[in-house]
Image: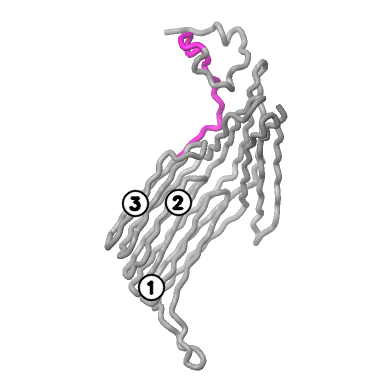
Amino acid sequence: MRLIYVALFLAALISSASAVSWTGGVYNVTDGSSWWIHRQSANLSFDLSSSVEGEIAPIIGPGGRVLSSFHAHYTDIDVNDVRLKERTAALEGVYSSEDEIKLRADATSSVNMTETKPAGSNVWTITFEENWPVALNASRMIDYTGTGLNDRDCVGNNLDSVGATFLYNKEFSKERTAGLKLDRMNATVIATDDTIIRADVMPTRSTDYGLESHSTGIADLRYRQTYPDETAHNSGLERYYGTYDIKRNIEMRSVYSDLVNKTDWLSCCIEGCYGMDPVNSGWWSESEVFDCVCG
């Protein structure tokens, strides 16, 4: 088997923030199977505080032309797959909002790749270790009465996500808080001479999301938490029609140790090799095989 690994680092100066990225992958030339990952972060800090209060009303322009009333709000943050997306659109009415955002990211550490293949085994283990932490804290308050308002928000943390959508509201209020933290990311690919067996992406992360709302239209609330193989571990979707007061708090935690523990392949002399992972099918020393004490 021939494994191809590619790592690309790009550095640029963007408003005093140093942006970097890397791409890693494994390609098996025997059957053409492949797995790739791309990561992008920066060394940066960002703070925002804003407050808006007023009336959304038509404007009389030159020649008596009437300009329609409209308000729009847009936020899009994505640093090393720690994300915040917001959209608000409101027609004529009374509107107020407050926003706080604090973002910190560090991408100074090197990204490491290791390959291991036990003697006598055809199983390869390729690991990628990244220590590019990100911390994002954001809050938003909205209060509105008028013709109509639509509001969407979504926070994401390396494939975990929480979000809410509010449509067709004539009366609407919302207080939302979000705290997202990424500590590190490890990825492991298991492959043989014939194919890639498994690929796991294991970011150590936490997501806290709080919402209190009053809505008079349609409300959709959703969340998703993933396994290392990117399939859903927990997920949910709720929909409300009508006038509702909704309060919700969601906490997600995923912790993956960067320490490697040796597998007890004999399972204390009872199970034998039937429960072994293929990656541990190499040779062991005499003491590892026979120095086993059963209770």
Q: From the viewer's perspective, is residue 101 above or below residue 72?
A: above
Mark closer to the chain start, 2 or 3: 2
Q: Mark 1 points at which residue?
A: 95
Judge left or right: residue 208 versus residue 273. Answer: left
Observer-side mark, 1 or 2, equals: 1
Reading the image, the residue beneath label 2 is 179
Task: Name the residue tied to disc 3.
Answer: 238
**Mark 2 packing: few (<14 Cα in 10 Å), some, or many (20+)?**
some
Whichever of callouts 1 and 2 sits on the residue coming sooner in the sequence is 1
Taking the magenta stretch, the answer to whether it contains residue 259 is: yes
- Residue 164 in the image: x percent, y percent? 40, 56
Which of the 4 image quarters holds residue 153?
A: bottom left
Residue 288 on image: x %, y %: 57, 11
Mark seen at residue 210: none
Q: Residue furthest front?
A: 31
Q: Give the CA distance from mark 1 to mark 2.
A: 26 Å
Q: Nearer the viewer, mark 3 or mark 1?
A: 3
Distance CA(mark 2)–CA(mark 3): 22 Å
Q: What residue type is labelled 1?
A: Tyr
- The percent position of residue 281, horizontal first and vertical second, equals 59, 17
Callout 3 touching callout 1 (CB < 8 Å): no
Amino acid of disc 2: Gly
